[in-house]
Image (cartoon, rainbow, N blue to C red):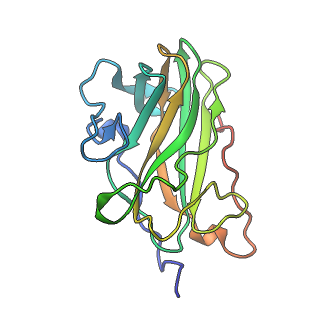
Amino acid sequence: MKTEPDEDPDLMPPAFAEGLDDWARGDGTPESPTYDRIDSARIALNDRDFGACMELRKTESLQRLRYMGELPIRLGSYVEISARIKALRGPLPMVRIATWPGGAGGQGIADLPSTGPLLRIEAHEVPVGLRLVIGPEAGPGVDLVWDERALYAHVGLDLVGPDGGVVRIGDIAVRDVTRGHGPGHRALPGFAPAPI
């Protein structure tokens, strides 16, 4: 069976600068409420670290952010999700990359792992990077192992902890890294500090 694609697909979600109507406060499924036109979220321009980005005031103990588009999961492929975030003011949250695995008929697959490790933000105004890899087999650098039932995913972040803090989030990136997980390749870590 051929498992490596001939070319890398374009998996990138839209930039936050294009609007927040594609970004959900729930799991990303069609019925999820979005961050468009609510008081706790806005597009911030000219941030010194991120440029145009999303500014979000935390209003729930578990604050979800999910792209409502369906990220295709191709059989045998490895997909990397990465993001950058910083706290502006208020209580410092923990953050993790989070997903919603979807299967046939638009149904969620509850028994597949869906979140990466929690990373505590230690200081204000310091960008932090997160990275997570979804793949079909366990191995170094693979955070979530999904089987053939997973056909697509809604991807994004969870913010965990006290309410009231304000964060800024750079554009969330998604790319196919199947070639980087073949024999002889060094896998990427689950998350790492972002370069400044």
Quadrant in the picture for residue 10: bottom left
123 or 72, which is in the foreground? 72
Write the residue at 50% across / 44% down.
98
Q: Is residue 76 above or below residue 115?
A: below
Q: Is residue 3 above or below residue 165?
A: below
Write the residue at 54% across / 27% down.
160
Q: Is residue 155 left or right of residue 138?
A: left
Quarter of the image where the C terminus is located: top right
Residue 119 pos. (x, y %): 65, 34
Residue 54 pos. (x, y %): 40, 30
Quadrant in the picture for residue 150: bottom left
Quadrant in the picture for residue 125: top right
Residue 23 pos. (x, y %): 33, 39
Q: Residue furthest bottom?
A: 1
Labels in figure, total: 0
Residue 172 pos. (x, y %): 46, 44
Write the residue at 41% across / 36% down.
65
71 or 177, which is in the foreground? 71
Write the residue at 35% across / 47% down.
14
